[in-house]
Image (tube, helix red, strand yellow):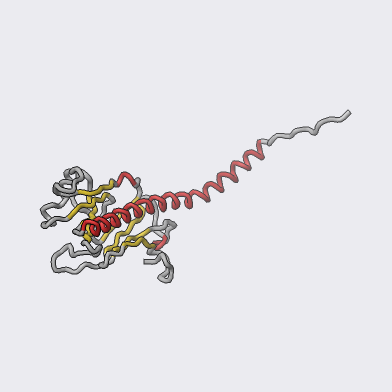
Amino acid sequence: MLTSPRQRGVSLVEAMVALVIGGILLAMAMPNFSAWIAGTRIRSTTEGLLAGLQYAKSEATTRNTQVRFQLTSSLDATCVRSATSTNWIVDVVDADADADSVVGQCNAMPSDTAAPSILQVRSASETGSGVAVNADADQVVFNGLGRQVPVVAGTPPGNVTIDVTPSSATGRCVAGGGKITCLRIVVSPAGQVRMCNPAVAATDPQSC
C-alpha cells in the first residue's frame, strides 16, 4: 500500500529566522527608498517650475510682449514675491511693471485685459511637502524675442539659478554627502531654460 509523502509545515524557528532576515533587508532598503521618494518630489517640483518658465517664454514670443514668471509666498491677497517659494505666477507685464504687479493680488482671476493680467498659477501644494526652493531672483521677465530683460533698470540680466533641494528634515543632496538627487534650473540672459544636476561632473551632459 502506497502512502503519500508526509507534509511538513514551517517551524516556529524557521518563521522567526525569515522575519529577522526580512527585517534586516527592509532596514537596509529604507534609506534608499526614502531618498527615492525625496528625489521624486524634487523632480516634480523642478519640472513644474521649468514648465512655468517655458510657458512664460512661449507667451512672450507669441504675444510679442514682456511676460513675467515670479515666485510668490502664497496665492492669496497677502502674497509677496519670494525667492524661496514653490508657488509661481505668470503674468503679462504692461507699461509699468510695478503698477500691475501681482503682489497683494495673487488671488485675482486670470485675465488678458485686466491688471494684474495673470495667465497661469501653480500652488506649492501640487508638488507636496519636503521640498525647498532657493533662487537668486524672485522673478524672470522675457521679451518678445524670448530673451531675459532687466528687472532692475540699467542692470543687464545674468544667469538666474533656482535650486530645488530637500527640506532640512528630509535629508541631504548628493553634493552634500547625502543620497538625494537635487536639481537646478538655469535661465540664461539669452532666454535658454534648462534643468541640470549640480552634483555631476562638468563633462556630463546633465551638469550645470
- The residue that appears at 20% across and 64% down in the rendered structure is 149
- Position of 127 with respect to 36 (left or right) is left
Q: Residue furthest bottom?
A: 203
120 with respect to 21 (left or right): left
- The picture places residue 187, in percent across and down from the top left corner, at 29, 63
Foreground residue among 88 and 192: 192
Going by the image, does 21 lie left or right of 206? right
Q: At 20% from the left edge and 48% from the top edge, which residue is drawn? A: 118
Residue displayed at 42% across by 60% down: 174
Against 117, is 145 above or below?
Answer: below
Residue 69 seen in render: yes
Q: Is residue 138 visible?
A: no
Percent position of residue 63, x then y: 21, 56
**Horizontal and vertical percent for residue 47?**
35, 54
Q: Quadrant of the C terminus?
A: bottom left
- Which residue is at the far right? 1
Question: Image check: 6 left or right of 115?
Answer: right
Task: Please give the count of numbered marks on the rendered protein.
Answer: 0
Which one is nearer the viewer's eye here, 106 or 172? Answer: 106
Where is residue 41 drawn, in percent x and y?
A: 38, 50
Q: Nearer the viewer, residue 145 or 27?
A: 145
**Residue at 10% of width from left, 53% of height from top?**
99
Find residue 126 and report its image quarter.
top left
